[in-house]
Image (cartoon, rainbow, N blue to C red):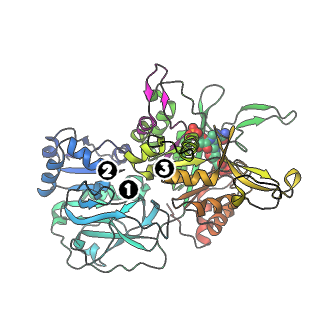
Amino acid sequence: MGLFLLDYGAGNVRSLANSLTKLGYEFEWIASVQDFDKATRIIFPGVGAFHSAMQHLESKGFLEPLRRYIAAGKPYFGICIGMQVLFASSTEHPASPGLGVIDLTIEKFDSSEKSVPHIGWNAAQFIEPDERARAPDVVDANSSYYFVHSFRAKYDEKLPDSDWVYTTTQYGQEVFVSSVRKGNVFGTQFHPEKSGFAGLKLLKSWLESDHTAVSLFSPSKRLPQPPQSTHGLTKRVIACLDVRANDQGDLVVTKGDQYDVRERTVQDNVAGSVRNLGKPVSLAERYFTEGADEICLLNITSFRQSPLQDQPMLAVVRAAAETVFVPLTIGGGIKDSVDPDGTKRSALEVAGAYFRAGADKVSIGSEAVIAVEALRRGEDTSTCAITTIARVYGSQAVVVSIDPRRSYVDPATYEGPYKAELIHGKNEGPESGKAWWYQCTVSGGRETRPLSAVELARGVEELGAGEILLNSIDRDGTGKGFDLDLIRLIRTAVHIPLVASSGAGAAAHFVEVFEHTNVEAALAAGIFHRHEVEIASVKKSLEDARLNVRIA
Ligand code: 1PR
């Protein structure tokens, strides 16, 4: 089979390559215009920004060959941006027209009633009840697929080219086109390469389907798809791996209590060796097979002693991406840095290396605080890590990890800037009678900064971040449950998706956080590493509580 992949240079294309290898297919990358003639199937796994994708196709001279390839009736499968480029245009960049194969426009989701980007697992519904009878099946309406995007084609059966619509999906109260299919062309807004076993099955079905039979398929009537009362987006359960070198220099998964990752000797409470809870790649694989919706790898000692390309975390990501087919977020050290030989590396370059290795999102911690402080001082932040990475890879690829700590004050006398953010909760011991605000820290909690978590969250949203990973130093490793006060505060401050983190000690804590706050995802580390609670039992508890979850 002359299977070719089109890489436009941005985003994680490695995962698709890994999926195909796992399925036993051989493929080549399109490197020249002549490859379009050799190809008998093309997959374009675009991630990121519409404009960057179109610009890349144009600058490489691939635009016309791709148009000709599609017009010749040869099988094309576009994923995410690879589907969107088929459309006439996108409001993401109106000056950059698409291929125009489908005469519809891509627009941004309405964020007035929901978080944008749309991130997570959602269902795909066939547009015609008898669709399956007419064409070889590719999408499975009973499976969930992984979406990550801010722009979408809104579904309306009266649109001129609505006969392209294969499936629709509902997010909030909007119904949008989640896949298109006509003749030789197929496209999905979701990422099959990140959709676990359901995604692998879809890829296999497309690769094995007889496209000449599909070309006979020309649906005649489109049905209206009025929004249902609830959408199909599931609550995500994320496993987090804090990775660092132990005292022997090996990379291990560790886990702290309130960010202290060293063993404590019982007698004199002296810090011992770094806690070792396993190997990062094998633990990531374990969590994938156990049904984690996403996996987060944080390099918690992210100082650089080797050139970017030799970074041990890059090797971890590459290896993890070969066996993990759900989204991978990589954090720690995503910032401008200098290699030992003096070569400067921008945060964009560092992030790019991780995306190429197989990461889907990068998570930025300390640098985000520095950038928002600069934003508050009125300085130019156009070259900060968040903004530059979001511009090229899309905001959905940029997570900001917040490490707040409670700062206790006497509410009667406090005159500081965060009066409106004070939480008046119950405290015991020396904090009895005090209120608190959430103060930002950098360098894994080692340094506090004069900035509140609310200000940071608002600032990073303005700079272009697509998601917030909200930790709590006070709750980390305690098993007391998520800090609901903190989560509610940040939830009301921003419109981007929020991941609750730190403190999970039981499956019930996941139910509690989803029932009492409107977060999109919840993350845990210690309880999963120590087998105290299994991911399956978390999902079961959520299902029992009538919360929407993906059962892998
Ligand atoms: O500042 O951009 O280099 O990023 C460093 C990253 O490393 C940040 O995301 C920061 O949160 C993380 N980090 C730094 N030091 C530590 C530490 O533990 N000493 N870990 C650390 C953050 C918090 C979560 C943890 C949850 C859930 N760890 O990752 O997994 O609290 O834990 P639990 O379920 O066991 O309670 P930069």
Which quarter holds ligand 1? top right
**How far apart are the alpha carbons under marks 3 and 2?**
26 Å
**How far apart are the alpha carbons under marks 3 and 1?**
26 Å
Foreground disc of the pair 3, 2 = 3
Q: Amino acid at mark 2?
A: Pro
Residue 512, image x, y percentages:
67, 66
Q: Amino acid at mark 3?
A: Leu
Residue 162, image x, y percentages:
24, 73
Question: What numbered label is drawn on residue 463?
Answer: 3
Identified at 59% across, 29% down, the residue is: 250
Question: What numbered label is drawn on residue 191?
Answer: 1
The magenta stretch spans residue 56: no
Dot 3: what SS? helix
Left or right side of 353 for 186: left
Identified at 52% across, 59% down, the residue is: 497
Work out whether 351 lies above or below 186: above
Can see residue 200? yes
Q: Residues within 10 Å of mark 1 (few under 14, many from 20)?
A: many
Q: Amino acid at mark 1?
A: His
Question: Quarter of the image holding residue 126?
Answer: bottom left
Identified at 75% across, 36% down, the residue is: 263
Q: Nearer the viewer, residue 58 or 120?
A: 58
Left or right side of 331 for 80: left
Can you identify the residue that label 2 sits on? 45
Foreground disc of the pair 3, 1 = 3
Question: Quarter of the image holding residue 282?
Answer: top right
Residue 169, image x, y percentages:
39, 69
Q: Is disc 1 in contact with disc 2, using a CB cutoff of under 8 Å? A: yes
In the image, which residues are magenta? 327-352
